[in-house]
Amino acid sequence: MIFHVLSQHHWESCEGTRQARGEDVPPLVERQKWIEGNDKVKVLGAYGYQTEHRNYAIVEADSYAEVQALFREHLRRGHVEVLPVNDMIGIRKESGDWGK
């Protein structure tokens, strides 16, 4: 299944802001590890909208629970929305309508 993920946090809880204040936070290389996915979730695309402290991702996984596990750390910082979506290009191709 393909999922669209929106993750957003408040600027005050942003780990970059917290780091600038001298708080102890994991390094950026660790905070962004989710972008690589894992054995159960393939990240097809990852996009940031830094002004609003939002991340968007298109991921592929067998279950919602696998996606939720990948974004577990995001859940601790703010709003996360995981939506299953249809691959409309794939559906059109499978139905034989592509190119008609």
Image: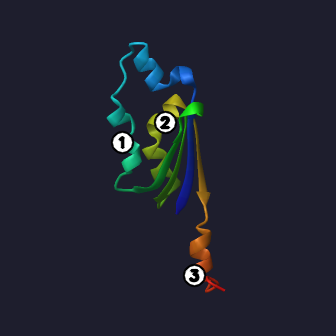
Q: Amino acid at mark 2?
A: His
What is the distance, in whole Å, between disc 3 and disc 2 at their CAs?
A: 35 Å
Q: Nearer the viewer, residue 72 or 57?
A: 57
| Residue 94 badge | 3
Q: Helix, strand or loop at disc 1?
A: helix
Res 19 quadrant in image: top left
State the image coordinates of residue 57 (x, y, percent, origin top left): 51, 49
Q: In percent of the image, x 44 and y 25: which residue is there? A: 15
Callout 1–callout 3 Cβ contact below 8 Å = no
Q: Nearer the viewer, residue 16 or 77?
A: 16
State the image coordinates of residue 42 (x, y, percent, origin top left): 41, 57
Q: In percent of the image, x 53 and y 61: which residue is there? A: 2
Rendering colour mode:
rainbow
What is the distance, in whole Å, between disc 1 and disc 3 at their CAs?
A: 34 Å
Q: State the residue position of label 2.
A: 74
**Above or below for 35 versus 86:** above
Q: Amino acid at mark 1?
A: Lys
| Residue 33 badge | 1
Q: Nearer the viewer, mark 1 or mark 2?
A: 1
Q: Nearer the viewer, residue 63 or 23?
A: 23
Q: Helix, strand or loop at disc 2?
A: helix
Q: Using a 10 Å C-alpha cutoff, classify the residue at mark 1 as few (fewer than 14 neighbours), some (14 to 19) or many (20 or more).
A: few
Q: Using a 10 Å C-alpha cutoff, classify the residue at mark 2 as few (fewer than 14 neighbours), some (14 to 19) or many (20 or more).
A: some
Q: In percent of the image, x 49 and y 36: which residue is there? A: 74
Q: In percent of the image, x 59 and y 57: which residue is there? A: 84
State the image coordinates of residue 58 (x, y, percent, origin top left): 52, 54
State the image coordinates of residue 90 (x, y, percent, origin top left): 56, 74
**Above or below for 19 versus 85:** above
Of marks 3 and 2, which one's residue comes earlier in the chain?
2
Q: Amino acid at mark 3?
A: Glu
